[in-house]
Image (spheres, grey):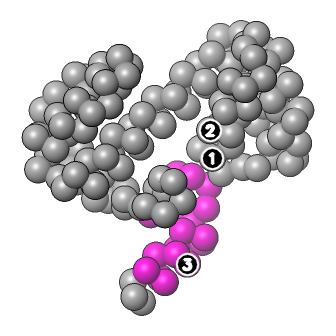
Amino acid sequence: MWIDIVASILEVVIDGGVALLSYTVNKTEKLSLARKAELDIRLWHPKELQRLLRDNQKLQAIKLYRDETKASLKEAKLAVEMMQADMLVAQHETRLSKGNPASLDEVRHFLQTGNKLKAIKAYRKSTGVGLKEAKEAVEMLAAKWSLG
């Protein structure tokens, strides 16, 4: 129990998204970044895993992850979800920087100042996507950047 308390305190102290001790999925389940890194080292086919995720074959990706890392089902599911989220965030960042490199900075600025609505509008203007997709993208970017 005291380890969870210390980890929670350290998560708050080491803010910024770079050195977080754990990654939260669905606000209840966590997988420590150290454990994920330990498992990821065992992957023999990381590119195949990424391909499966790009092709929306999440179950096959989880199975591949379990087979190669010997992780539990829960750990494999969380690790694959983390990878999937990281891939989506990278796609959103790339999409923003392709439209106009300043757009990425503009969205970050709006999130830093607490103006999520303007960030969504800036994302839509730069990428031409719909409101729902822009909202989801901005929320993912905010989570990655530990903003908003």
Q: Residue 98, image x and y in percent?
A: 65, 10
Q: Residue at x 48, y 37 (%)?
A: 85
Pointer 2 local density, CA inside 10 Å: few below 14, some 14–19, many at least 20: some
- Badge 3 amino acid: Ile
- Badge 2 amino acid: Met
Residue 20, magenta (yes or no): yes
Q: Which mark is residue 143?
A: 1
Q: Residue 72, image x and y in percent?
A: 19, 55
Q: Which residue is mark 3?
A: 9
Can I make out residue 12 in this image? Answer: yes
Q: Which residue is mark 2?
A: 140
Q: Residue at x 46, y 76 (%)?
A: 7
Q: Is residue 109 above or below residue 112?
A: above
Marks 2 and 3: which is nearer the front? 2
Residue 67, magenta (yes or no): no
Mark 1 → mark 2, Cα distance in angstroms: 5 Å
Pointer 3 local density, CA inside 10 Å: few below 14, some 14–19, many at least 20: few
Secondary element at tag 3: helix
Q: Nearer the viewer, residue 55 or 21?
A: 55
Magenta span of residues: 4-22
